Each structure stands twice: as C-alpha cells, then as structure tokens.
C-alpha cells in the first residue's frame, strides 16, 4: 500500500471519530471578516492597543500549517484574501473543543471565533474561543509543498496549485482584473458589449482548422467558433457602430507555450474608422493595462526588457523582412527564387510552393516574429494573405492591416475592413482554390454586405497572451485555470 493510501485511510478514520464529537460538514458557521480586512484594520496597532479591542471575529478558511506545543497550538488559516494566525489553547476553547485538533489535518477547512491580539513576536493572531471543522481533507497535501514543483500536477490539479501558491492566485486575480479593465476601457469609449454564436454552420472568420460537432435534431454539422468576426460585422451592417465581444474561440491545432485549442480574445469593430485608429486605440489600451497591474513603462518579461516609454514602432511587412533577414533586399523581396534559396539556407518549410506572398509569410513567421521584442505594429500585409482586409488606396497589392508583436509574439491583429461585397466574394473564391488553410465561402455574409457595410475598422486581441505578458508568465498554461492536457496513460 502506498504512503498516500495509508494517509487517506488514517484521515477517513479521523473523520469517523469526528462524527461522535461534532456534526459533520456543517453549514451554519458564519464569518464576519477575513484575513485581509483584519490586517488592514489591526496590523499597525500595538500589542497594548489591541488589548482593549473587545470585538469577536469569526473567520473561515483552510489550515495549511499547524504547530502544537503541549496545551496550546498555533495554526495558519488561509482564505481567499490571505492568511491569519490562530492561537488555540485548552483554556480558550475548552477541553472538548480543543480535542477536535487531534482529528484535524493540514488542508482541513475550519471556522474559528475569537479576539484579536498580537503575539510576543508581533504576529497578528486570533485567540480562538470557538473552533469547528467545516470540511475534512481526506487526501494529504503534497509533501514539502512550496507551490507545486511538478508541472503536470500544477496544470492537471489546478485546485492544489491555487490552494497553496500565492503567486498562482495572484496571476489569476491579475487576469480577472485585466479583463475587467479591458471591458471598462471599451465601455468608456462608447462600445457596446455583444454576444454572438459559438456554434457556426460554416467555419469562418479566420484561417484555421475547426472543431466539428453535430446537431442531431437538424441533422447538420456545426463548427465551434474559430472567431466571431463575421457575426460582429453583421452587427455593424445592422447599425451598431461600435461593438466588442470578449469571446471563447476554438482552433483544432497543436499545443504549445503560446497555443491552447480553447482560448480567449476580444474582437471589436468601429464604423467609420480605419486601421490607424485601431493602432492608436490598442496602444492606449495596453498602456492603461500596464499601469493597472502596477508595471512601469519599462518592465521585464522573462529574458526580455520591454520598453513602452516611446510610441509603439510601426514597420511595414516587407521592410521587416528586409531589416531582419540577411540576403533579402528591397530589389529581391518579391523574387521567388531568392526567397526559396533563403528558406533552404535557414531550414524554413515553404507551405505553398511557388507562392511569393505565402513564402514571405513563412519567412516572417520563422525569422522576424521572434525578433520583435518591444511593441511593434507590422503593417501593409500582402493582399493575397489577408482575405478580409481592405486594399490600400496607394498600393492594391497590400492591405490596410497590422499585427502587433511584443516579446516575439503576436498580441493583436486588425485592419480596415473590406466592405466591397464583390471584392470579398472574389477573394473568398480565390482562397478556396489556392489555400489549404482557408475560410469557407460564407454566402450569407456576402448577402449581408450587399445591403451596404459602412467603412469599418476591426481588431482582435489575444487576452491569454496579453495576460502572459503582463504577469510575466512563461506559458499560456500558467494563465488558464484549466488548460487542455493529454489524458494520463
């Protein structure tokens, strides 16, 4: 029998013994404060000042350390807001209630009442007069627990990670705060938050492999949302001039430190604006978020120093390749043989043989992206790889599109929207013929556009990656409560 199984048997025995001493799993104990509020109110008071404090405070939480010393015990109680020390003694609780400690283990959830005081060492504590076991932990916590060192357990059993690791709890509280700040920022800019379908009859809105499901009653296949783009544009056509959606999207692709098949992003659209507006807007948004999580204008992300003091750099797509790829210059940026030779020298797989623009994108993805450390907008992508973007008035071979990169990762993608239904229909058709990773032809969306779509700008921001950046998290799994994991064998 394993050591863990022995401990589980012992804990179950303690639970059985508890049943003769007290009611199991009670729900009548009510707290009137938490550890954070107690510290806020009393941390700065002296030991002598606290002696005159008459209030009785009741707290609840999980026991994570217990130190018994004869007829008295010190224990740390952890709740959602922090931790507070408990002092228990036979004199304070009475012999029968103190005996409950013999049946208490690390991880148990308890309630305690008592007066506030400070120990000789100045530690704020509660002198417990009433003690109750609210829920028993039948499984022992991992030994030598200082935050989970086993990454598998950390991700598979997130509740254990959150139970003990203050750093992990802070990351997720920061995430919640970041999403809240994003929502408030958009609302203050007169955007309306909307909801669009997560099951689509046609896979569209981005070039990616979808998850397929089936509706039994209608006997039809549906696709989990790749992106909400085409539905949000329908709302623009319908007359909502500024909309956003904080959405869950799904892409049937691989797992990595920056990819999870289920992810969160915000997409937003503004009528009568263009992609320059979007870049300015996103720059303001990110700078406000940096302030909200307490980072300075220059901050550290993993091995990088990120500088946001200056305006975010703007660099067009072709120039970025020329700048970062030796052997590719302005005169041969559109020469396929030069691009092909560069790919062979640098071990870059060409996704579509003979395609100049796709090969440029392959080179950008492999070489350029990882070198964009400080915030950089890459602009003017080739029209051939941007089927939903508006062509540039100055050069129809490129579109009014950007992607924002920080710390070598894409954070946002946006463009002036294509609002010419004939051009859109043609580009859908061309992509179906030439691109393996394509969007399907959405005839209903073309019909909607034919009613007239105003000039519009739209963008998507990857919230998971943005949270990674702002919390200095190395992997996307560190900022997802429950990342997708391969089943245990």
Image (cartoon, rainbow, N blue to C red):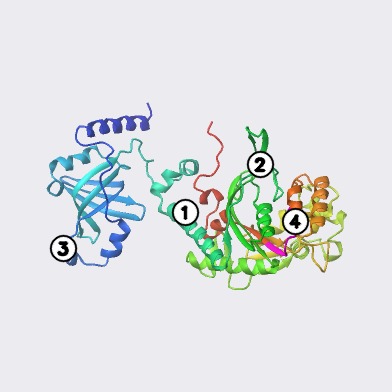
Residue pointed to by mark 2: 223
Mark 1 or mark 3: name the one nearer the start of the chain.
3
Q: Residue furthest top?
A: 1
Residue pointed to by mark 3: 51
Find numbered disc 2 in the image and state the secondary structure of the residue it sits on.
Answer: strand
**What distance separates the C-alpha of mark 4 from that of mark 1?**
40 Å
Q: Are marks 2 and 4 in contact (CB under 8 Å)?
A: no
The image's mark for residue 318 is: none
Mark 3 or mark 4: name the one nearer the start of the chain.
3
**Nearest to viewer (mark 2 / mark 4):** 4
**What distance separates the C-alpha of mark 1 from that of mark 3?**
38 Å
Mark 2 or mark 4: name the one nearer the start of the chain.
2
Residue pointed to by mark 1: 172
**What distance separates the C-alpha of mark 1 from that of mark 2?**
29 Å
> Residue 278 location, x and y as percent?
66, 66
Q: Residues within 10 Å of mark 3 (few under 14, many from 20)?
A: few
User: In the picture provided, is 370 more to the left or to the right than 329?
Assistant: left
**What distance separates the C-alpha of mark 3 from that of mark 4?**
74 Å
The image shows residue 12, relative to residue 280, as above or below, that is above
460 or 333: nearer the viewer: 460
Q: Residues within 10 Å of mark 4 (few under 14, many from 20)?
A: many
> Residue 56 location, x and y as percent?
19, 56
Residue 235 can be seen, yes or no:
yes
Q: Quadrant of residue 313?
A: bottom right
**Nearest to viewer (mark 4 / mark 1):** 4
The image shows residue 172, relative to residue 241, as above or below, that is above
Q: Are marks 4 and 1 in contact (CB under 8 Å)?
A: no
Residue range of the region highlighted in magenta in the rendering: 448-457
Residue pointed to by mark 4: 449
Find numbered disc 3 in the image and state the secondary structure of the residue it sits on.
Answer: helix
> Residue 340 location, x and y as percent?
83, 52
**What distance separates the C-alpha of mark 2 from that of mark 3?**
65 Å
């Amino acid at each position: 029998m394993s050591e863990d199984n022995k401990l589980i048997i012992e804990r179950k025995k303690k639970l059985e013994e508890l049943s003769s001493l007290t009611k199991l799993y009670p729900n009548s104990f009510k707290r009137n404060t938490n550890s954070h509020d107690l510290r806020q109110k009393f941390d700065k008071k002296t030991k002598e000042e606290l002696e005159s404090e008459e209030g009785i405070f009741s707290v609840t939480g999980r026991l994570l350390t217990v130190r018994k010393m004869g007829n008295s015990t010190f224990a740390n109680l952890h709740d959602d807001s922090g931790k507070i020390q408990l002092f228990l003694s036979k004199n304070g609780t009475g012999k029968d209630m103190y005996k409950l400690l013999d049946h208490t283990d690390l991880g148990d959830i308890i309630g305690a009442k008592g007066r506030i005081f400070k120990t000789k060492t100045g530690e704020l504590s509660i002198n417990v007069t009433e003690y109750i076991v609210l829920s028993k932990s039948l499984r022992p916590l991992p030994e030598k627990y200082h935050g989970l060192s086993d990454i598998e357990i950390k991700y598979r059993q997130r509740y254990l990670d959150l139970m003990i690791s203050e750093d992990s709890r802070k990351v997720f509280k920061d995430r919640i705060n970041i999403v809240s700040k994003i929502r408030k920022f958009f609302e203050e800019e007169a955007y309306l938050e909307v909801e669009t379908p997560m099951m689509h009859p046609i896979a569209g809105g981005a070039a990616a492999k979808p998850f397929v499901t089936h509706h039994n009653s209608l006997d039809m296949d549906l696709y989990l949302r790749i992106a909400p783009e085409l539905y949000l544009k329908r709302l623009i056509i319908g007359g909502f001039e500024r909309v956003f959606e904080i959405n869950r999207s799904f892409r049937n692709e691989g797992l990595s430190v920056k990819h999870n098949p289920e992810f969160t992003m915000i997409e937003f659209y503004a009528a009568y604006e263009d992609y320059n507006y979007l870049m300015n807007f996103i720059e303001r948004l990110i700078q406000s978020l940096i302030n909200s999580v307490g980072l300075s204008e220059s901050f550290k992300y993993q091995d990088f120093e990120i500088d946001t003091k200056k305006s975010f750099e703007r660099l067009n797509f072709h120039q970025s390749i020329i700048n970062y790829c030796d052997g590719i210059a302005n005169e041969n940026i559109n020469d396929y043989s030069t691009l092909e030779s560069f790919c062979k020298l640098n071990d870059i797989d060409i996704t579509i043989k003979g395609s100049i623009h796709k090969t440029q994108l392959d080179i950008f993805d492999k070489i350029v992206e990882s070198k964009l450390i400080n915030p950089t907008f890459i602009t003017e992508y080739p029209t051939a790889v941007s089927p939903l973007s508006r062509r540039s008035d100055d050069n129809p071979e490129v579109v009014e599109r950007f992607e924002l990169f920080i710390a070598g990762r894409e954070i946002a993608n946006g463009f002036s929207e294509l609002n010419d239904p004939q051009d859109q229909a043609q580009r859908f058709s061309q992509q179906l013929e030439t691109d393996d990773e394509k969007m399907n032809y959405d005839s209903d969306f073309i019909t909607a556009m034919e009613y007239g779509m105003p000039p519009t700008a739209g963008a998507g921001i990857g919230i998971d990656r943005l949270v990674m950046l702002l919390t200095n998290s190395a992997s996307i799994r560190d900022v997802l409560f429950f990342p997708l994991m391969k089943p245990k064998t």
